Image: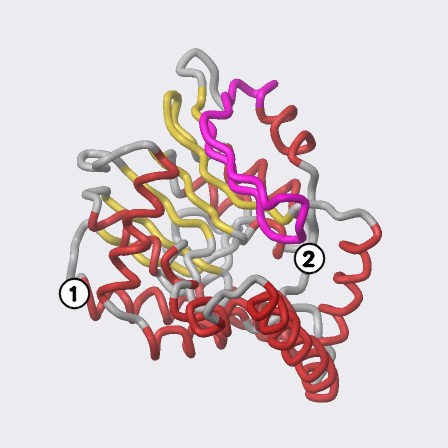
Amino acid sequence: MNSTTDISMPSAAEVAESHAAEVARGERFKFGENWKKFLESMSEERAAEAVISLRNMLGRDSLEGLTFIDIGSGSGLFSLAARRLGATVTSFDYDSDSFGCTNEIRARYAPNDPQWKVMQGSVLDTAFMKSLGQYDIVYSWGVLHHTGAMWDAINNAAALVKPSGQFFIAIYNDQGVWSKRWTRIKKFYCSGPMGRAVVSGTFIPFWVARDLASDIVFLRNPISRYTNYGKARGMTIVRDWFDWLGGYPFEAAKPEAIILPLSKRGFRLTNLVTCYGSVGCVEYVFSLDDKKTS
């Protein structure tokens, strides 16, 4: 981030300090710490699965000649996927460790690549967002609902889409009372070591037992559940477990609450993947009418 662009913009050090303070107060999960562990299992196979996933959702075989911004880049896996599809990539994350993880992925797989820039910043920082310009593809998977101000984050992200560009976001499905319960559980997880131990020690064994029972009843191979998990988006089930349990701040929205406001701003829904009524993320891909701006 270039702090000279606008005097109201915080420096990278100030962003890191703000993030650390929120974590210390129990107001934010250490997403980047989880991604650091994910990098231990990073492989060419995971990179290839991410490329396939991104290509299928966007409906494009190539991103050659296009600009792509990854808001809340996390591990950096999908920034890498976009780069491999030919896009000029900008990645940024608020979390210091996630910023480091994206840099690590870039160093491993695209060292000194001038067409991939990695920054630290917040989607809620209006001055920072305005300094970034606009992009052919604005991507933010499972991020904007963890900012503490989801609607502001969605609006700020949408403003980065060029006319005729694509807006690809994934937002947790609103489950009403269950989403409220999960908010309390996640907040407790982030409250300290006891919260982490109680929540993870309760839910992870339950999930393992539940899935094992289901596999036995339906005559499925229990091991394949874990070995095939990464084929969806290149991720790992264990890291996603912790991401879900600790993912705070936490907000959710019903599909109509996402689709209708964006449609009024000139965005047209072109792809949608629901989560069958579960608490997972709904994936949305929009195209922006070239006669309107966001």
Q: Residue at x 68, y 57 (%)?
A: 250
- Residue at label 1? 111
Q: Residue at x 68, y 61 (%)?
A: 249
The location of residue 290, given as percent across then percent down, is 40, 15
Name above or below for residue 291 compared with residue 156.
above
Name above or below for residue 282 compared with residue 110.
above
Q: Residue 139: which quarter of the image?
A: top left
Mark in the foreground, 1 or 2:
2
Q: Is residue 282 a member of the stretch shown in magenta?
A: yes
In the rendered image, the quadrant that contains the N terminus is bottom left
**Does residue 11 appear left or right of residue 151 in this picture?**
left
Q: Bounds of the magenta span?
A: 263-286
Q: Is residue 246 a member of the stretch shown in magenta?
A: no
**Does residue 45 appear left or right of residue 114 in this picture?**
right
- Residue at label 2? 250
Q: Nearer the viewer, residue 113 or 62?
A: 62
Label 1's element? loop
- Tell whether label 2 touches label 1 (CB within 8 Å): no
* Badge count: 2
Label 2's element? loop
Q: Residue at x 50, y 42 (%)?
A: 169
The location of residue 280, given as percent across then percent down, is 61, 52
- Amino acid carrying label 1: it is Pro
Q: In the rendered image, is residue 14 in sight?
A: no
